[in-house]
Every structure is written in structure tokens, then in C-alpha cells.
Image (cartoon, rainbow, N blue to C red):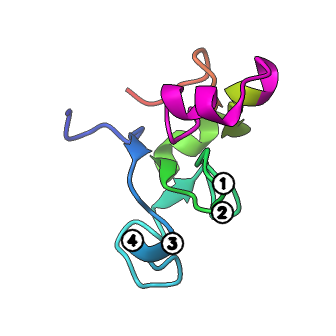
Amino acid sequence: MRPTEDDIIIMGDLNADCRYFDEDSNCTICGGGYYWCINNSVDTTTKNKDCTYDRIIITTGAVNDYTGDSGVFRYNMIYNLTEEETKAVSDHYPIYAEFWTNKDNDS
């Protein structure tokens, strides 16, 4: 990582909800300096839970490059999968965030 880079994206299965993470806790990347593209209201699990385990978190330097479009790809609904077929793929849905590639104004 370049020490002068302001556009940083953190993404993945962070187990950042439910019994693993208190969303109201005082954590270092929950406040100033970071923006959560996948917020606490998004269920990223394929099971009968309401948990946001998967996240995309960006630094405020990357916010200008973020289009505001993000979410969860619920492949079971698109491909009309059964619960068993869905679980065979994963217990998490893929998440996404869209970024401009031609608006970066830092060096």
C-alpha cells in the first residue's frame, strides 16, 4: 500500500453483525474517516437470519469515487434456486459496490 493513498477499500466476510459484532460499539472503523457501503440494514446471509456479515467499507478519500450503488446479489431469486441449491453455493450472498473509474483526482 502506498502511504499517500487516500482511496482504500476494505471488503469481505467480516462477521460484522449479530453475535460476532455489536454494531453500536465503539470501533475504530465505525466513525469518522470511513464510510460503510454495505450498512447494518442489509442481510448478506442466505439463511433465515438478518445479519450483515459481509461489508464494503471505504475511506472518506474514496467516497467521491463511489457511485452510491451497492447491495447484495440474491442469486437464488435470479436463478430460481431451492434452499438446498442456494446453500450448496454459499451461506452468504455476494455483495457489490460500484465506483467511478474516471473521476479519481488524487495522485
Q: Residues within 10 Å of mark 3 (few under 14, many from 20)?
A: few
Q: Residues within 10 Å of mark 4 (few under 14, many from 20)?
A: few
As shown in the figure, which amino acid type bears the numbered disc 1?
Answer: Asp
Q: Earlier in the sequence, mark 4 or mark 1?
A: 4
Q: Earlier in the sequence, mark 1 or mark 3?
A: 3
> CB under 8 Å between callouts 2 and 1?
yes
As shown in the figure, which amino acid type bears the numbered disc 4?
Answer: Tyr
Could you say whether the residue bearing mark 4 is in a helix, strand or loop?
Answer: helix
As shown in the figure, which amino acid type bears the numbered disc 2?
Answer: Asp
> CB under 8 Å between callouts 4 and 3?
yes
Report which residue position mark 1 lands on: 43
> Can residue 55 be seen here?
yes
Q: In the drawing, what numbered circle is on residue 20?
A: 4
Report which residue position mark 3 lands on: 18
Side of 7 relative to 89 (left or right)? left
Q: Residue shown at 48%/59% (left/top)?
A: 34
Q: Residue shown at 58%/61% (left/top)?
A: 51
Measured Cα–Cα span from mark 4 to mark 3 = 6 Å
Q: Residues within 10 Å of mark 2 (few under 14, many from 20)?
A: some
As shown in the figure, which amino acid type bears the numbered disc 3?
Answer: Cys
- State which region is magenta: 77-95
Q: In the drawing, what numbered circle is on residue 50?
A: 2
